Amino acid sequence: MLSPFVLNIDAGNRPWKNPAVGLGLMMDSNNNVHSWGHTGQGPESTIAIYHFKKQEPMTVAIFEETTDMAFVENEAVGLELP
């Protein structure tokens, strides 16, 4: 699940600079954000749930009434940063 398959795409404003996927998980292939999780959308809403591997591991879930995946992913990464 955690072995990255590199996508070689431009992620735009999303926090993943080297996007990759595992088995059902999204991650960064060079692991500079040290996280894995998934982002999803429903009618007029987006969710991002990520686990951040660090000295004190943290799992973050962000729910917003938006269709902007970059917004919720950046919010999740922002909560992880000190």
Image: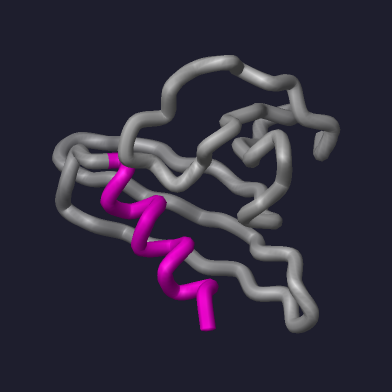
Magenta-highlighted residues: 69-82
Answer with left or right where residue 82 lies relative to residue 53.
left
Quadrant for the N terminus in the image: top right
**Quarter of image, res 38:** top right
Q: Residue at x 40, y 38 (%)?
A: 40
In the displayed structure, 78 sits above or below 18; it is below
Q: Residue at x 16, y 46 (%)?
A: 66
**Quarter of image, res 63:** bottom left
Q: Which residue in the rendered view is the most extreme toward the top? A: 8
Tell me if residue 65 is in the magenta stretch: no
* Tag count: 0
Q: Residue at x 43, y 51 (%)?
A: 48
Answer with left or right where residue 54 lies relative to residue 11.
right
Q: Residue at x 75, y 72 (%)?
A: 54
Q: Main secondary structure of the magenta part?
A: helix
Task: Give x and y (percent) for residue 26.
Answer: 61, 37
Tell me if residue 72 is in the magenta stretch: yes
Q: How is the image coloured?
A: one colour
Task: Give x and y (percent) for residue 28.
Answer: 64, 40
| Frontmost residue, 76 versus 43 | 76
**Quarter of image, res 14:** top left
Answer with left or right where residue 15 lies relative to residue 44.
right
